[in-house]
Each structure stands twice: as C-alpha cells, then as structure tokens.
Amino acid sequence: MFNETFKLSNGIEIPKLGLGTWLLDDEQAAQAVRDAVSLGYRHMDTAQAYMNEAGIGEAIRTCGVAREKLFITTKVAAEAKSYDAVTQSIHESLAKLGLEYIDLLIIHSPQPWTEFREEKRYFEENKEVWKAMEDAYRTGKVKAIGLSNFLQDDIENILAACEIKPMVNQILAHVSNTPLELIEFCKKNDILVEAYSPIAHGAILGNTEVKAIADKYGVSVAQLCLRYDIQLGLVVLPKTANPDHMRNNAELDFVISDADMETLKNAEQIQDYGEHSFFPVFGGKLK
C-alpha cells in the first residue's frame, strides 16, 4: 500500500493517495470507504455536492480505524457565495458527516456550476467566502482550508485579501490535460495541488502511447497516470467503488523516468470525456 504523505503549509500531513467518491450515493460511498480503509487508505474526499456525506460519516464510524488516523476532505457548495451561506454549509457538513472537525475544507468552485468559467468571476463574493473559511479554521472546526477549480487570478484575488493562505487547490490534472503553469504558480505560493479525475474518468485508458509506456514499467495505465501526478508533486484522488481497482491504484512503488515524464506531459489532449463530457470541469455546461 502506497502511504507516503505531503506536508501542508501549516504542517499538517496529507496522504498523497486518497479515495474520490464523486457519483457514489450514501450506501455506495459507505461501502467504498470501508473497503478502502481495510486496504490501507486513510484519505477520503467528498463534497456537499456529492450528496454522500452521511454515507461517508457512517463509514468513518464503522470502519474500525480511529477517527484521528483518517484524513477527511469535504467541499463547500459552489453556490454558497456569502459568509452566512458558507458558515451554514460548514455546520451542515459537520452534522451530516457526524464529525467534530473536518481535516480539509475546500471551496468547490470559484463560480456556481451553472456559471462555471463565465464572465462573472465572483471575486468579491469569494473574499467573503474565504473569511468564513478562515473563521472555521480558527475555531478548529476544520484543520486546513483550500480551493478547488480556482484559476491563477482567482487565487491571486484570495491571496490579496486573506489572513490565512489557501493550503491546497484541487484541480483537474491528468496525463493529456496537465495545467503545468497553474501547478507551478500554486507551488510558488506554497499551495499543494490535488488532482481529481487523475485517470481522466477512464478516457485515457485507450491511449496507445500511454499504454506503451505503462507496459514498459509492467503497470496498468491507471497506475502510470497516478504515479505521473505524484511525481509532479500532486495528491491523487482516483474515484472507484471497486476494491480490486483500489488495490491496483495503491501499488505505486515505481519511478517514471524523466524522459517518459516529458512524453506524458506532452501527450495529445483528450477531446472527448465520453459520458462525463457534460460536466463543467470536462468542458461541458450545466443548465
């Protein structure tokens, strides 16, 4: 089991490998977390928008591992854009999870999903959202605070007004779609980058060039993709409810050569994410 950690800017350790739980309902998420914990996973990622926080909470209570040994992330709904809305959101997440504290709390998006990457940027609103995050951090309700889907100017807006700097930015980052400039900007500002959909929701699995490199190392394409992100200094959050996939995803004790890393950085960009293409983060549009 791959169990290395990164250190956040406030000194807290975060496992480099976590379990994503997007598109899993309460029952599926609870079972997935119990399975993952039994295999050695200690980092679980959820969000208000996933509507499975109650299931995650049930798994935390029934998985047989002490709460303090687990690292739990959730995300404030993208539509919560006022101090009061975020404060209420944090209260609701704690209640649904049944936890006294959350290890990492993230703003899910700089804009509501129906306005994702549109003209209105919500700069002023996000400053207010961040104040609520800082206050939750100061009271100990959350141990670390961060962002998700924030572009460089979105982050600069927070940095210009904050008292506590964001500790992470969780973004779409995988072979064939790696925002290297944004990753570099985050690193320069001591913001750890987390990669969601690190296996491109399976859209990368048929890439023959990537498959040839995976074969060279005797690993699966999924393992190669996870190792690629980790070598870029990113946390990876592969989503699966399949214990066999969880086990495979956690076997990452190999090293990709510099030459192969360069090839993977320049892999042809995925144009079609299949059934996931309608989600904003994959270039789609929510109505």
Image: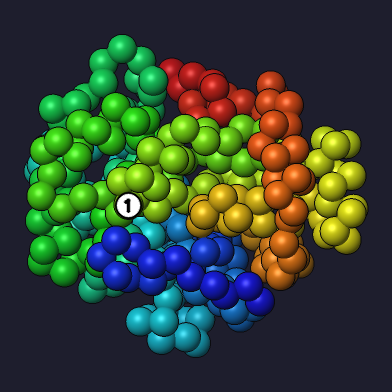
Quarter of the picture containing the N terminus is bottom right
Pointer 1: what residue?
190
The residue under the point 63% across, 73% down is 2
The residue under the point 74% across, 53% down is 257
- The percent position of residue 61, horizontal first and vertical second, equals 41, 80
Residue 75 in sight in this render: no
The residue under the point 83% across, 51% down is 214
The kind of residue on which mark 1 rests is Asp
Observer-nearest of 187 and 53 = 187
- The percent position of residue 177, horizontal first and vertical second, equals 61, 32
Classify residue 207 as left or right of residue 223: right
Observer-nearest of 130 and 64 = 130
Residue 236 in sight in this render: yes
Q: In which quarter of the image is residue 188?
A: top left
Residue positioned most to the top: 119
Classify residue 96 as left or right of residue 211: left
The residue under the point 88% across, 36% down is 208
Indicate whether 201 appears above or below 248.
above
Q: In which quarter of the image is residue 120?
A: top left
- The percent position of residue 99, horizontal first and vertical second, equals 28, 72
